[in-house]
Amino acid sequence: MTEPAWRADPLHWGHGPVLFEVFLEPTCPFSVRALSKLDSLLDQAGEDRVTIKIRLQSQPWHMYSGVIVRCILAASTLELGKEAAKRVMLAVAKHREEFEFEHHCRGSNLESTPNEIIARIEGYSGIRLAGAFAIPDLDREIKWHCKYARQNGIHVSPSFMIDGLVRADMGSGDTVADWVSRLPNG
């Protein structure tokens, strides 16, 4: 088997011994709220105390979820790697309603094509990702995220794991200080 010509940069920040994993769907309003707190978590907990890993949790009721997840992972294969992926996630989060359907079933996005969604993300993020989106076997990375979530009993977003244990008592409405208080002393 030959090595692929591309590599998806893992969506990891920090390098500490405590593992904080968050499962996010890019257009979910609760995932957007959690995403907006991750930099503060890293600042408050310390990069040498915690490693934050974003796991993408595509959900079919968010109609363009699969396209957007693929855009994020495509961005991670580019020169800027995880930072390009983060810019895509933040651009989608900032303009979330432009990537979502009203009540998950109607609105102007009914007329949008995947190519229009990709172009919209490129415009907001400044990341040219259409070429990377077309990587034929990029789906193996998408499948890994799905499989990992299922193996850990994750079905909704956002979901949280600390050191491999699902934390059903955590949510996006918690303060960053609450999250930090739940981390083991590392």
Image (cartoon, rainbow, N blue to C red):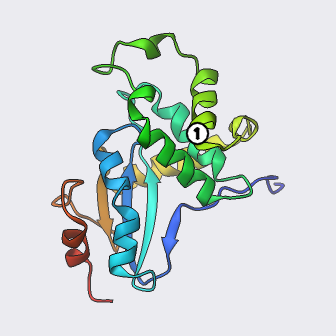
Task: Identify the residue at image location x=20%, y=77%.
Answer: 181
Q: Position of residue 136 (x, y in %)?
A: 74, 37
**Can you name the residue that lies furthest to the left here?**
169
Q: Quadrant of the C terminus?
A: bottom left
Left or right of residue 167: residue 126: right
Picture layout, residue 74 above or below residue 37:
above
Residue 153 seen anywhere in this rendered image of the structure: no
Which residue is at 52% across, 40% downward? 69
Q: Residue 60, how many percent across, how many down?
A: 39, 29
Q: Residue at x 46, y 33 (%)?
A: 65
Q: Name the residue located 64 percent from the left edge and 60 percent from the top edge.
A: 9
How many marks the image carries: the answer is 1
Compared with residue 109, is residue 140 higher up or lower down, i.e. above or below?
A: below
Q: Quadrant of residue 143?
A: top right
Is 84 in front, or is 170?
84
Label 1: which secondary element: helix
Q: Is residue 178 above or below residue 87?
A: below
Query: Percent x, y for residue 131?
Result: 76, 37
Quarter of the N terminus within the rendering: bottom right
Q: Judge the density around disc 1: few (<14), some (14-19), many (≥20) Cα neighbours within 10 Å.
A: many
- 94 vs 143, nearest the viewer: 94
Residue 47 placed where, x, y %?
45, 80
| Residue 26, image quadrant | top left
Q: Is residue 155 left or right of residue 178?
A: right
Q: Label 1: which residue?
A: 70
- Is residue 49 visible in the rendered image? The answer is yes
- Name the kind of residue labelled 1 in the image: Arg
